[in-house]
Image (cartoon, grey):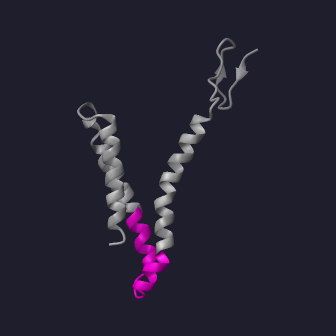
Amino acid sequence: QKLVAMEGVKNPGNQTEPRDTYKIAYIIHFLLGAGNLLPWNALITAVDYFGHLYPSRHIEKVFSVAYMSSSVLVLVLMMSWGSWRKKLSFRLRMNMGFSMLVLSLMVTPI
């Protein structure tokens, strides 16, 4: 009798599924989610402050469009530079992407 995995793919009986005993996958996904949501939450809480400074502007719309456009811009730039992966180290590419995202987020309130 064959075992059926959660995805519906049949596993041969002699192979076992890899176990994540230290929950590393869950921790990584949690950190990625927190890293994505923390800047967004910071911008959401700053909306009241900037709404008080600029009462004639629609700050909620400006912040959401600016945040999403900056994230998409960084994503497109990093994906278009895919041919650089042979020239640049993984660490440098990760730091470049993070730095570009931080700079684009700092431009949003300005």
Q: Where is residue 44 drawn, in percent x and y? A: 50, 70
Residue for point 68% across, 27% down:
5
Task: Tell me if 34 is positioned left or right of 57 in this view.
Answer: right
Residue for point 33% across, 35% down:
90
- Residue located farthest toward the right when viewing the structure as drawn: 1
Pick the front one: 57 or 106: 106
Q: Main secondary structure of the magenta part?
A: helix
Task: Tell me if 7 is positioned left or right of 57 in this view.
Answer: right
Residue for point 51% across, 64% down:
41
Pick the front one: 15 or 106: 106
Residue for point 47% across, 73% down:
46
- Tell me, yes or no, whether the highlighted magenta stretch contains residue 66: yes
Q: Where is residue 107 drawn, in percent x and y? A: 32, 66
As drawn, 67 above or below 53: above
- Residue located farthest toward the left when viewing the structure as drawn: 87
| Total numbered labels | 0
- Tell me, yes or no, whether the highlighted magenta stretch contains residue 71: no
- Residue located farthest toward the front when viewing the structure as drawn: 22
Q: Quadrant of the N terminus?
A: top right
Q: Where is residue 92 drawn, in percent x and y? A: 30, 40
Q: Can you tell which quarter of the image residue 19 is in?
A: top right
Task: Tell me if 70 is positioned left or right of 86 in this view.
Answer: right
Q: Can you tell which quarter of the image residue 23 is in?
A: top right
As drawn, 24 above or below 104: above
Q: Quadrant of the C terminus?
A: bottom left
Pick the front one: 39 or 4: 39
Q: Where is residue 84 drawn, in percent x and y? A: 25, 37
- Residue located farthest toward the top when viewing the structure as drawn: 14
Over which residues does the magenta segment extend?
47-67
Task: Tell me if 7 is positioned left or right of 44 in this view.
Answer: right
